[in-house]
Amino acid sequence: MKIVDSFKVGILQHKVSNYVADKVENLLIPRLDQLSNKDNMVNTDYFHKKQIFELNEIPELVEEIYKCKDYFNQTLKSHSVHHSKICGYWVQDYRNDKDHHVRHNHGKNELSVVYWVRADKNAGPLVIYNPIPLQSFLYSEASEPRNEYTTAAIKVSPEKGGIVMFPSCIDHSVFPSETKNCIRTTIAFNLDLYK
């Protein structure tokens, strides 16, 4: 009798240098007043015709995202991925303890990236849900013990300069913050992959 690990999903976590993190933060923070809050959840430029910055203004961060080739190579080997391209991006600024983002996914793209422009220790986490429905059905948040077979979701704490990359089809959400006046600003990216 044996257990075959058949359906694991990789999630990449990476941290950029302080130089890159500071440069991106200094560029974006003065522009946050250009964001709007359409759905009463978060301030964003997702619905704007034009984002509040251009990719050519953050070349070092773009390079860091593309450097995550280890993720492509280790988890998508069978797809012979050689090229990737950022096909969409937007800024989200969570300004109070009620700001959040409901469970959703970016289905049609290959990979999604969350980059934290800034965050403090009380900011709510990014939650990434196990794509196998059985885990959510059988196990609650309080279930013990937790392992790769019983984990329904993982929580990633925000950290300035942090990158999280995962397949776009995976559901994720952003929880509200623990206290008022929390700082949490992100850039979300979608990437297409090519052979």
Image (tube, helix red, strand yellow):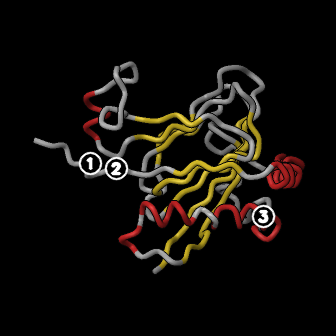
Question: What x and y, as percent, mark residue 116?
Answer: 70, 45
In 3D space, how far apart are the residues under numbered discs 3 and 1 (Cα atoms)? 37 Å
In 3D space, how far apart are the residues under numbered discs 1 and 2 (Cα atoms)? 7 Å
Question: What x and y, as percent, mark residue 114?
Answer: 62, 50
Q: Nearer the viewer, mark 3 or mark 1?
A: 1
Which dot marks residue 117? none
The correct choice, above or below, for 144 with respect to 155 in the image is above
The kind of residue on which mark 2 rests is Lys
CB within 8 Å, label 1 to label 2: yes
Please name the residue shown 65% across and 56% down the image.
47
* Nearest the eye: 111 or 174: 111
The kind of residue on which mark 1 rests is Asp
| Image quadrant occupied by the N terminus | top left
Q: Residue furthest front?
A: 1
Which dot marks residue 60? 3
Asked which quadrant contains residue 145, the reply is top left
Disc 1 element = loop
Q: Earlier in the sequence, mark 3 or mark 1?
A: 1
Q: Tell whether 71 sits left or right of 58.
A: left
Please name the residue shown 69% across and 52% down the image.
187
Disc 3 element = helix
Question: What x and y, as percent, mark residue 195?
Answer: 45, 80
Dot 2: within a 10 Å radius of its alpha carbon, few (fewer than 14), some, or many (20 or more) residues? few
Dot 2 corresponds to which residue?
Answer: 8
Dot 1: within a 10 Å radius of its alpha carbon, few (fewer than 14), some, or many (20 or more) residues? few
Please name the residue shown 37% across and 34% down the image.
152
Which dot marks residue 5? 1
Q: Earlier in the sequence, mark 3 or mark 2?
A: 2
Please name the residue shown 83% across and 52% down the image.
28
